[in-house]
Amino acid sequence: MIKVGANRRKSLALLIAIATAVAGLFLSIKLTEGAAFAQSTVQVPDVPIVPKMIAGKPYSVTPGGSPGTWTVKWGDQSMVWKTQPWMEDRQQKLGPAYIAQWATPGLPLPFEIPIEKRDQLTADQLPDRCLTYSYYGPYYDNGWDIAPIVVHLPNGSIRTSSETLEFYSVFTGGNGKQYLASSNETNVMRKYLWELTAPEELRGEGGITTLFTDPKLIPEDLLYLPTVRRTRRLAGAIAKQYFPGSIYRYEDVSYTGVLPQLDYKIIGYKLFDPSEKLRGFNSEGYPATAKRISGAGDVVAILEVTPKPGVSWWYAKRIEYCGLMAMCTYYTEEYDASGKLIRYYTHLPMSAAQGNIHVGTPTGPTNAPNWWVLWGAASIVDLDGGFISDGWIENGGFNAKTSASIFSPTTLSAQPMTLVDWLTH
Amino acid sequence: MRERCRGVLSVGVFLLVALLLLSSRVTQACQTFDELGITTCITLYSSAYVNLPDKRRTVFDAQSETFYNRHPDNLLFQNNEALVVLDGNPQKLSEMIGFPVHWHLEIRPHYDSTYDATGFGQGTYHSFLSDLATNVSGDMQDNFQPLFREYYVDLHPKHLFIRLGRQIIAWGKSDGVYMLDILNNFNLTNPQIFNEQQIKIPVWAANIVWQATTNGELQGIAIPQYLPTYYAGFQFKGGYPLNGSYADFTYGGTGFINNELNGSLGFKIPTDVNNPSTRLNNWVYGARWSEQRGSVHYTLNYLYTWTTTQIYYPNTGTYATASAVNLHPHRMHVAGGSADYEFNTGNPWVDGTVLRAESAVTTGDVYYEGNLGNPVDVTHWGFLGAFDRQILGDYLEKPIFFSFQYWQDWVLRRNNKCACGGNENKFQDVAYQGSPAGFRGMYKSLSTLYMDKTWMTADILDSSLSVVYDWQFQDWWIQPHTSYRVSDKTTVGLGFNIFAGSKQTPYGEFTNSSNVFFELHQSLL
């Protein structure tokens, strides 16, 4: 006959014994937290030095006529720069000179090129330098965050609200090598780990993306599906398609470098003076705590992106505005074949001075170098359909002391629910 | 007609419950209590499966030992359950012992209302089928449909991940084909559910992963208690099975043997059940090495386990002379591996295509051979090849995910001789009901096709088509399904299960149970 009850008690006792033995075995291993980060030897002045020349034209910042305003001039263009309450406190204090910190000589990739030579960057170099490395900095070991992403209906109400844990490391700057198996992985540019903790229907879904230095290689995606408790190799995503569950495209999130299907051309430079009506450049859609960096006052390279002949793409033309001081794509516009603006995208990064950006752990110190940035905040405005999406970092940081194996299916199958738990993998 | 009306009435009750749930007001998914380090989520799930054909069914009455026809009613399955999930990260404990600790508790109270309308159709068997607790011991109820479903502790010492407790562990790279992924057996009360975490039976296990290299992991597993696959119609009391083919999704083979034990041969056959004890030599042990090398992800697996179902052993060694039956599993070894690879060649016609493969040699498995169906110990080799690809990406805003699998299973050798009573080298498949049409050969294969496409902004509408085709039995299972995320808290689903084939084929046997089904997920917290 079945003797299940007694057997279960024996099993329980045996498992407890195993647990006790394992716990004892590793009792000496201490949980380490700390403010470890690669200290830069470069000292960025508290008040950054504003470059005198950018892209071959004189550049200047002078106090404006009223408090909180500055006059920015570049060549024959000028603008009045106004402090906004959603800007990082330090940017509110320093004004447009704030973004000049990323023009400080001696900073690493992507800021290593002197400001007076950044207009020599080619069209093919800008996508990685301005978007990839602004999202995922190559100058720290790893970055991580918890990010709400909200999609609004055309009537302004919320259609869906998700929350994502993110962890990433970029290898092109020589950091994060512990996450690579061997030297034969020189073709790996970065790794990205994500997991959804909301909405409930998608909770536990997660993935690992490996991106390669060769832009012709399709990124490799693993997807963990909690319904079957298994990690699956995902068939190659298509750069122009929507990122699942959002109105971002893969082109906005993963495929941020040069794509072989597209042509890139620099069509000019201008002083970046974004309208306050642009999503992200005002308080709409973001909590007051999501303080971010405005690229207003930077000089931007204007990049025109068009599909190669014979290629069917979701836009006929894209215009990207890449800031030469902060090396950041702040804004893009997408047009259809008739020249109608069908979508725009805004991107406002967050720096280590933001207040919610920590070192080591989600409650660690906030003493990373002020010039270190995370992707920050990004909005999509679909002018055709009327949908709007806002995403921002709620809590994030640098250089968590994770296992070298964190980019593994085991991390996904553990289905951690919080950043604290996640970063222990 | 009367029964059909009552079926419609049952769906009405389901829809009423659905409306009540939809009307509830909630604020956010899962609640995190930072000060306690605990996260709580509560979800309600309800589903109803309604029969489409209006047919009568032949069943066997164990009391009168006669067969008769009965209308099976139109409500095939209706289940209502809540899922309460608690996750905790005791920070102080972690700091005290020196490495991170996490615990997880999943409580799933459920109410199966399939047989609640008594007096007609399946309701006639209400006393047999309404609740497992009424006809099996409490222990078995807890094993197959536990209230406390998963509960475990995760320990994260350096380079290790240790999960101790009741859990689900998935192996392999195939969808819906289980060669390596047999660590958790299934509760097959409703075998049409694709959501494996709902119907896999969690096992007590010590699951230890050593992160040996950056890209390589060695997993060791020990499972002390054997929990066989649970079939509707597989319930025993007083030495006899309680039902034959009463339940809608009882496999024909299970119903057939149950009928024989209950007296369809003219005499009852007493039956005894012997599950393995939890002595160390009866545990299930497994090991897996998984690694990424270049663009290939692969695993090597070994499992020392038991057959996934209990085996019906005649007391005399042959059913020709058996006077009693003993049910117990048989030890088996499973050795195999799995791999996937994505083309990344620069050729757009093939790039992005993922190849998947899984293979296992199983020795010690037991098949029922020949006309007598005496159990024989076999070694068989399974292989699955598959490819996945996003298609029509140039023409659709959201492409279609396309997946095709081909699986085959060869019986390599029989490890004991069989007095089979004819039809040697043929084995009784799951729908076998006494005629050669229910035999499989030494070789068996099937294919699956899966396509999925999302629609609307934020992918709130999802549609899929799943097809299973058995090449030898030439029968089909087709499941179109769509789900719509009404809000972040509420998802509704609609689907069909269409079966086609002859009576003794694995999927064709359910032709008269083809159905439409409705689902509702409601998150409360």
Image (tube, grey):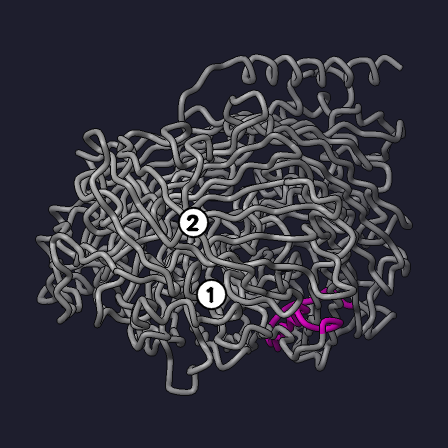
- Identify the residue position indicated by label 2 in the image: A330
Visible in this render: residue B349? yes
Q: Please tell me whether residue A296 is drawn above or below residue A75 in the rendered image.
A: above
Segment tinted magenta in the rendering = B348-369
Residue found at x 29% / y 63%:
A142
Dot 2, crowdedness within 10 Å: few (<14), some or many (≥20)?
many
Q: Residue furthest bottom?
A: A184
- Closer-to-camera residue (A379/B138): A379
User: Which amino acid is tagged 2?
Assistant: Tyr
Q: Please tell me whether residue B299 is drawn above or below residue B191 in the rendered image.
A: below
- Identify the residue position indicated by label 1 in the image: A126
- Helix or strand or loop: what does disc 1 sit on? helix
Residue found at x 41% / y 36%:
A280
User: Which amino acid is tagged 1?
Assistant: Leu
Q: Is residue B362 magenta?
A: yes
Q: Is residue A239 magenta?
A: no
